[in-house]
Image: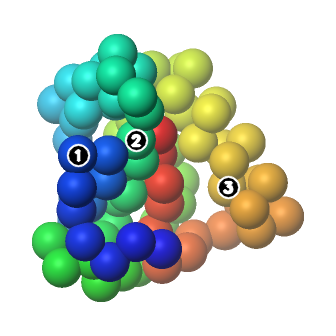
Amino acid sequence: MHNKESQIIEFRPFWQNEYMKIICAFANTEGGQLIVRVDGRGKPIGLKNLKKLLEDIPTNDLRELVKRKILRESGKMRAGPYYVIA
């Protein structure tokens, strides 16, 4: 995982719907990563309730994308230290 933010890396401690703007900005430029459950210094905070995170993501398409990414990276749906959303 990256340890500092940049034009293509954003750290956020939790999900907020306003982060859809960040995802759109990445989609309209050269891409990037929104990493949730990481503090501003790049340290993973951890997540105990993956189901709650998935419920908080506002669109079904993005929610399904996150689920597939988690399954691809870990092989199962489970809470982890952080999540790369976009």
Q: Give the labeled residue for mark 3.
A: 70
Q: Which label is found at residue 61?
A: none
Residue 39 image point, x, y percent? 21, 74
Callout 1 secondary element: loop
Q: Give the labeled residue for mark 2.
A: 32
**Quadrant of residue 28 in the image?**
top left
Rendered position, 56 above or below 27? below
Q: Amino acid at mark 3?
A: Ile
Circles 1 and 2 in contact, beta carbons < 8 Å: yes
Q: Is residue 72 left or right of residue 17?
A: right
Q: Amino acid at mark 2?
A: Gly
Rendered position, 27 above or below 5? above
Closer-to-camera residue (45/28): 28
Q: Amino acid at mark 1?
A: Gln
Q: Residue at x 41, y 47 (%)?
A: 33
Q: CA–CA distance between discs 2 and 3? A: 17 Å
Residue 79 image point, x, y percent? 57, 71
Q: CA–CA distance between discs 1 and 3? A: 24 Å
Callout 2 secondary element: loop
Q: Earlier in the sequence, mark 2 or mark 3?
A: 2
**Residue most toward the top?**
28
